[in-house]
Amino acid sequence: MKTYLQVWFNSEGASPSEVNRRLLSLGFKPIQGYYDYVYEWGNNVQVEEILQFGDKVHLSLNGLGVIFKIETIDGKK
């Protein structure tokens, strides 16, 4: 499974490099295309784990003035 992340920046918020630093510390990898970042899970991930990870992303980006969207996809389906 993979969790994809899109980030929308605000000119009054943190710099893209600061946002990038925080996301890298969570294990995200920057990518090009429709999404900005991807987090690759192991084979067996539960919905509760995905929700807890979303909470970590939220806490890490809190106060930076960005909006984000998370989408988790099972690559096998």
Image: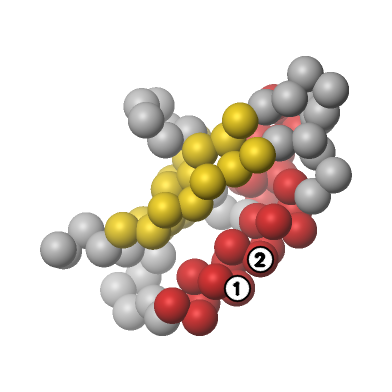
Q: Residue at x 60, y 73 (%)?
A: 52
Q: Secondary structure at mark 1?
A: helix
Q: Residue at x 65, y 56 (%)?
A: 57
Render colour scheme: secondary structure
Q: Position of residue 35 (x, y in %)?
A: 42, 35
Type of the residue with mark 2: Asp
Disc 1 + disc 2, Cβ < 8 Å: yes
Type of the residue with mark 1: Gln
CA gap, disc 1 and disc 2: 5 Å
Q: 50 left or right of 74?
A: right
- Give the label on residue 55, or none: 2
Q: Nearer the viewer, residue 33 or 68?
A: 68
Q: 73 left or right of 28?
A: left
Residue 73 higher or lower than 68, as above or below: below
Quarter occupied by residue 73: bottom left
Residue 5 higher or lower than 53, as above or below: above
Residue 40 higher or lower than 50, as above or below: above
Within 10 angstroms of label 2, few (less than 14), some, or many (20 or more) residues?
Answer: few
Q: Position of residue 16 (x, y in %)?
A: 69, 26
- Give the label on residue 52, or none: 1
Residue 47 appears in the rendering: yes
Q: 63 left or right of 54?
A: right
Q: Position of residue 12 (x, y in %)?
A: 84, 23
